Image (tube, helix red, strand yellow):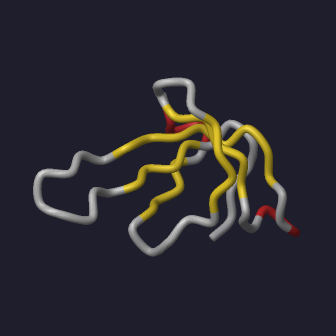
């Protein structure tokens, strides 16, 4: 997985009834665009994460 600052991560719900979440990549901490990423969720919460297989990268140009 590779992402750039401004890209969005779409994290699919893992259990029935859990909604998908979207986070904006605010900093790439890995080499060559790889994880981990510092992300900001829609509610303003920021965290460092290494996305799993339930995550899709939406490039900045497609995000909006």
In the rendering, at what x and y percent does residue 46 appear?
A: 64, 37
Locate the N terminus by quadrant: bottom right
Seen from the viewer's position, the closer of residues 59 and 28 is 28
Q: Is residue 1 left or right of residue 13?
A: right
Residue at x 47% of width, y 28% of height = 42
Which residue in the rendered view is the most extreme toward the right?
31
Q: Residue at x 79, y 44 (%)?
A: 27
Q: In the rendered image, which quarter is residue 40 located in?
A: top right
Which residue sits furthest bottom?
53
Report x, y in % for residue 50: 63, 66
Judge left or right: residue 32 versus residue 1.
Answer: right
**Position of 1 compared to 28: left or right?**
left
Which residue lies at the image location 63% right of the left edge and 58% below the top edge?
49
Residue 21, quarter of picture: top left
Residue drawn at 55 percent across, 65 percent down:
51
**Residue furthest out toward the left:** 16
Q: Is residue 23 above or below residue 32?
A: above
Looking at the image, which is closer to me, 38 or 57?
38
Q: How many marks?
A: 0
Establish if 24 lies above or below 18: above
Q: Position of residue 43 (x, y in %)?
A: 47, 25
Q: Is residue 54 above or below residue 18?
A: below
């Amino acid at each position: 997985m590779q992402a750039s600052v401004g890209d969005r991560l779409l994290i699919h719900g893992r259990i029935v009834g859990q909604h998908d979440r979207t986070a904006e990549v605010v900093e790439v901490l890995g080499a060559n665009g790889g994880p981990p990423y510092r992300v900001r969720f829609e509610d303003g919460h920021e965290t460092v994460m290494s996305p799993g297989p339930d995550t899709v990268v939406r490039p900045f140009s497609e995000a909006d």
